[in-house]
Image: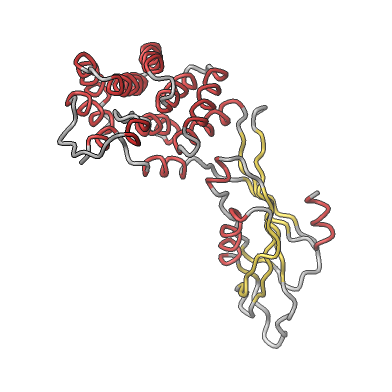
Amino acid sequence: MKRADRYRLPALLLLWATGIAADEPSVTYLEDDGHERVPLNTVAPVYPSVARRDRIEGDVQVCFKVDREGRPFRIAVRTSTNRVFEKPAIRAIRASRYQPLPDGQPVPAIKTCRTFRFRLVSTAGD
Amino acid sequence: MTIARLLPLLVLLASLANAQAPADRSAAVPKTVVGPNNADLADGAAALKAGDAEDGVRLTQRGLKSATSRRDRVAGYSNLCAGLAMLERFDEALQACNRALELDDGHWRSYSNRALVYLKQERYPEAERDISTGERLSPNSRTLKTLRTMYRDAVDPVSPSIIIDDRRETEADEAGR
């Protein structure tokens, strides 16, 4: 080991530290009537720790199709204000489920879209 | 130990000083280094890294007595600052950080360590000043980014919130504005 290295701690510890700094987000769900598919299990994305650390907020709209059994597929980001939020949004959609369609009812050809708004709310007054 | 209590410790550990100043490294003629000049400083740093603050402080103090080069003294005082902060002896830690910065006012790890001490003492303006100085000296330091987060969380705490918006586009767009 070189002399210089003997005084230095690997940066891995810090990566771990920053990764665990984020806390559980509060989740608000907004919907209206008349959607072709009814949500059964809606999974919220994780707030990326880097975005939490750097105080970044943003929106991601993800569009996808839902198969007969209620599983999302052909998931794609339609609009995004920051790429850091895209993977968590896609993962959340992939883990979400809709109510299956009854036998005989055709699967709608139209895509479903969902917008995730990542926000940081001040808690200074709490 | 909770994560909140662990985080400052990890910041301190990651800020343990390198005895070789960066400027010296770039200018140095390549040579083989057999071992550290000051074994006590190296052992002190190793003890601090292992989380043994008592031993780390003791060995670093002993190493400082025989440290001759400026860079070793700067590293020693910076590490001493980190060790004393781990022991929550904040006033002594500040003195050690100040000593390191008197010897080298461009040593970002000492600013980082001192900033954490200030944060622990709730001296936020001083902490912010040291974090900013450190960021200017080492813009990509993860330690300083973590400290910046700790500072922000102390003076302006936030909580993450996610809105899942399944409304049709017109309404959803209006809500986003």
The C terminus of chain A sits in image quarter: top right
Q: Is residue A35 left or right of residue A69?
A: right
Q: Nearer the viewer, residue B72 or A119?
A: B72
Q: Is residue B114 left or right of residue A72?
A: left
Residue drawn at point x = 27 percent, y = 28 percent: B48
| Numbered circles on residues, count | 0
Q: Estimate the x, y position of residue B99 in percent, counting from the top left.
A: 37, 13
Quadrant assignment, res A103: bottom right
Q: Quadrant of the N terminus of chain A?
A: top left
Q: Is residue A55 above or below residue A61?
A: above
Res B164 → quadrant? bottom right
Kindly give the residue lying farthest to the left in the view shown: B34
Colour mode of the rendering: secondary structure
Of residues A91 and A43, the one drawn nearer to the viewer in this rendering = A91
- Residue lying at 46% horizontally and 41% vertically, measured from the top left: A18
Closer to the camera, B70 or A95? Answer: B70
What x and y, as percent, mark residue B93? 37, 16
- Residue projecting furthest to the bottom: A104
Image coordinates for residue A42, horizontal then vertical, percent: 63, 61
Q: Residue at x 71, y 69 (%)?
A: A38
User: Where is residue A118 drawn, in percent x and y?
Assistant: 65, 49
Looking at the image, residue A70 lies above or below residue A86: below
| Residue A113 figure quarter | bottom right
